[in-house]
Image: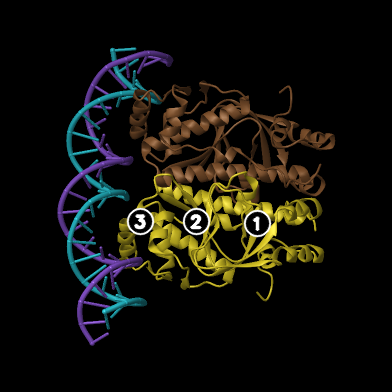
Chain colours: A yellow, B brown, C cyan, D purple
Amino acid sequence: MSVSCLVRNFSRYAELAERDIAFLLRFEETPVHYRTGDIVFEQGHEADHLYVMSSGWCFVKYDQPDGSRQVLDICHGGDIIGMREVCFQRSICGMQVLSDSVLCMFPKALLAEMFSEHPRLAGILFLAGMRREALLIERAVNLGRRSAFARLCHFVAELKDRVDHVTDVDVAHFDVPIPAALLADILGLSEVHTYRMLKQLAKQRLATFDSGHFSILNPLALRVACDYQNNYLLLDKSWLPAA
Amino acid sequence: MSVSCLVRNFSRYAELAERDIAFLLRFEETPVHYRTGDIVFEQGHEADHLYVMSSGWCFVKYDQPDGSRQVLDICHGGDIIGMREVCFQRSICGMQVLSDSVLCMFPKALLAEMFSEHPRLAGILFLAGMRREALLIERAVNLGRRSAFARLCHFVAELKDRVDHVTDVDVAHFDVPIPAALLADILGLSEVHTYRMLKQLAKQRLATFDSGHFSILNPLALRVACDYQNNYLLLDKSWLPAA
DNA sequence: CGCCGCGTTGAAGAAAATCAAAGCACGTGG
DNA sequence: CCACGTGCTTTGATTTTCTTCAACGCGGCG
C-alpha cells in the first residue's frame, strides 16, 4: 500500500495529530498474505492477534452445529479485524477471506497503548465500533422484518453506499467477489431462493449481480423498494477528545 | 439506589481504582423517572444526552415505514443507554421503557473526559460495547438461521443467563415485563405464531411464559433445543490498560 | 351490560425451503 | 478433438413454515 489504510480510514472520522498518525503506522508493520478461501480466525478458538485489512475482502461468519451458516459482515480495506475475537476468551465468529488479501497483524497490547496514550484514537475506534453496530442492526432488521426481495435490495443498496464511501465517488458498477452461496447466507435465504430474487432484481431493472460484479441500474428505485435509509453513515464526532 | 449501578456493572469487568469509581459516580447525579411505555429516544431524532439505567427495563426498537417493528435488545440496571444515539447525528433506533424506571442522565462531554482521563474505564466501555455486539450477533443468527421454535428457546435461554449474570445466582423463575407483542417483535415472528410457539414450549416442559413471568422448567433441554452456547459471556480483559 | 385488550384456535393463503432435474461453462484427461 | 466430471445457475414441482384473517372465550372495567 502506498499510504496506510488505517490512517486513511481513521482520517475519515476526524482530523489526526502527527503523533497519532505515527502511532497508527505501527499497526501495519507485519503484512500477512492470504489466498481466496483462507480462514483468518476459526470460530471457537482463542485469538491473540488483531489485523488491519490492507487489501482484499473478507467476511464474518457464524456456523451452527447443524451446518447452517449466517454471514454477519463483509470487511474491506482499512477495517480493523479481530476486535470481537480478542475481547472474548473464545472467538464468537469465524472470519474468512473472499479474495487474495493482505492483512497486517498486530498484538493486542497495542490496543491498551492506544487507550492509555492516544485517547482521541481510542474514541475514533469506539466510533468505528458504533458504526459497525449500526450495520449489524440493519442486518438484523433485514433478517427479521423484511421480505426476501427487500432484503436483497437493501443489501445491494448498502453495499453500494459502502463502496462509494471508500472510493469517494458514486459508482454504478463495482466488484465484490461474493459467491451466490455466500449471498444466500448473508440474506438468511436458501441458495435457490436467492437466485430467484436475483432474477427478479434484474427483471425489475433495479440492479444486476453476476459472479461478483454488481451493476446498479436504478439506484433510486432500488432504495424505494426496501425503504433504504443511510442514517448510519452520518456520524457525530463532536464528543471526541481533543488530539 | 444504595450503590451505583454503573460502578457495580463496570466492576464486573475489572478491578477499579478509587479515582475511577469517583468519576463513575458523576454519571448518576441526575435521575429521571419514566412510566411504563414512555419513549426515551425517538428514532430519527438527535440525542444530546446519555443515560445510565438505574432501575427498570427498557428496549431498543427499529420501526419501519410500513409499521413493522424489530426489537433489537432489552436493557436493564447498570446499562449505559444512548451510546448509539450520541454517535450518530440522527438516532438509528428508538428506545422505550418497559416498566416504571429510573434513568440517570449525563452529558456526552463526560464521555470525552472518560476517554482522555480514565483510559481503563474507556477500555471497559469498549469491552461492554463488544459484549453488546455479541448479543446482537446472536440476535441476527436467531433471525436469519433458526426456526421459530428455536428462536424462542434461544431467547429465553439467553434472557435467563443475563438475569443470572446481574443477580449472581442461578434462577429458575424471573420476571421481565415483556408483553407478548414485544416478544413477537424480538423474535421476528407474528404475534399469533409466537403464542403457538409459547404453547409448544410449555407443552414440551422446557419453560413457561405468562404475562412477564418466566419459569425455566428444564434448562438443559432448553439449551439443547436451540444449540445454545454462551461464549459471549466469557470476556477477556487481559488487554485493558492499567488503572 | 357492553366494550376492550389479551389469549386461543382454526382455516386459508403466502412465502420460502426443499427436492429433483437439467443446462452450461470449464477444466482435465484420454 | 472429444468424453467426462464438477461446480455454478436455472427451472419446475412439492412441501413446510409462517402469516394472515376471522372468530371466539374470557376477565376487567367503565
Residue annotated with mark 3: A149
For badge 3, the amino acid type reads Phe
Q: Report the number of discs.
A: 3
Q: Position of residue B231 (x, y in %)?
A: 56, 40
- Disc 1 residue type (three-letter): Leu
Q: Which residue is mark 2?
A: A229
* Viewport quadrant of the N terminus of chain B: top right
Residue topped by disc 1: A50
List x then y, in percent, for residue A208: 37, 69
Q: Residues within 10 Å of mark 2 (few under 14, many from 20)?
A: some
Residue at the spot x=80%, y=49% of the render? Answer: B116
The relative height of residue A37 versus residue A141 in the rendered view (above or below) is below
How many angstroms separate mark 1 from mark 3 (CA)?
36 Å
Dot 1, how many residues are within 10 Å of its Cα: few (below 14), some (14-19), or many (20+)?
many
Q: Which mark sits nearer the N-terminus, 1 or 3?
A: 1
Relative horizontal placement of residue B77, taking residue A160 as reference (left or right): right
Give the foreground label among 1 and 3. Answer: 1
Q: Secondary structure at mark 2?
A: loop
Q: Residue at x 33, y 34 (%)?
A: B193
Chain under numbered label 1: A
Disc 2/disc 3 C-alpha distance (Å): 17 Å
* Depth order, front residue of C7/B125: B125
Label 3 chain ID: A
